[in-house]
Image: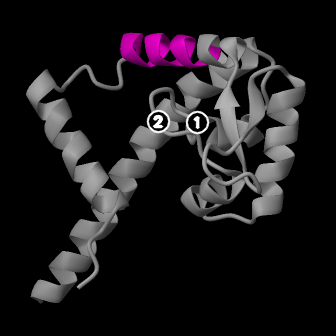
Amino acid sequence: MAQSADVERKAEIVRALMEVANGADAVVAEVLGEFGVPASVAGTLWALAPGTEPPTMRDVAARLRCDASTVSLAADKLQSMGLIARRPHPTDGRKRTLVLTDRGHELWETLRTRLHASRLFAGLDAQEQDALLALLTKMRNPQRP
C-alpha cells in the first residue's frame, strides 16, 4: 500500500509541474511571439541563460536531451534572427559556443521581466521560491548512487 501512495504522490507532483510549466510556457510564448521567435527554438534559447558559461551545441543537446542536429537547426534560426552568435570555444579551437547577442539579451530581459510580473510565483515568498529552486535543481541533477 505504501508503494501505491508513493506512485500516486509522484504522479501528482508531475501533474503539478506540468500545470506550472504550461503557465510559464504561455508567458514565454507571448514574449517569443513579440520578438517573432518560433516556440520550437525556446529550449535552445533557455540553454543560453545570461550569466552562464556559453555552451557548445553538443552541451545544449545534452541539456535538452535531443539530437545535436535539432540544436543546430534551432541555432541557425536564432542566428538568422540576430539573437545568438557562434563563437570559438575559449580553450578548444575545434568547438564553437553559442552566445547571446545584444538583441538576444534584450529578449532574455523581457522574458525575465514578464515572468516576474506574471502570477506564476504569486503564492510564494522569497524563501519559498529559494526552496523551490533548490528542490528543482536537485531533481534536475540527481546524484547517482
Judging depth in this view, the residue of 97 and 7 nearest the camera is: 97
Q: Please tell me which residue is depicted at 12% across the width and 89% down the height of the picture.
A: 1
Residue range corresponding to the magenta coloring: 107-118
Name the kind of residue labelled 1 in the image: Leu
- Residue 120 falls left or right of residue 3: right
Report if residue 21 lies within the magenta region.
no
Q: CB of mark 1 within 8 Å of CB of mark 2? A: yes
Q: Residue flagged by tag 2: what amino acid is it?
A: Thr
Which residue is located at x 85 percent, y 22 percent?
A: 81
* Tag of residue 52: 2
Name the magenta segment's main secondary structure. Answer: helix
Q: Which mark is residue 92?
A: none
What's the CA distance linking mark 1 and mark 2? 7 Å
Residue 123 horizontal/vertical position (percent): 19, 24
Residue at disc 1, secondary structure: loop
Q: Position of residue 73 (x, y in %)?
A: 86, 48
When the figure is inspected, residue 90 is found, relative to residue 127, above or below; the finding is: below
| Residue at mark 1 | 48
Q: Is residue 88 left or right of residue 135?
A: right
18 or 130: nearer the viewer: 130
Q: Residues within 10 Å of mark 2 (few under 14, many from 20)?
A: few
Instruction: Return the x and y of residue 68 as percentages of the image width and height.
Output: 76, 61
Image position, residue 98 (x, y; %): 69, 39
In the image, 89 versus 74, the foreground residue is: 89
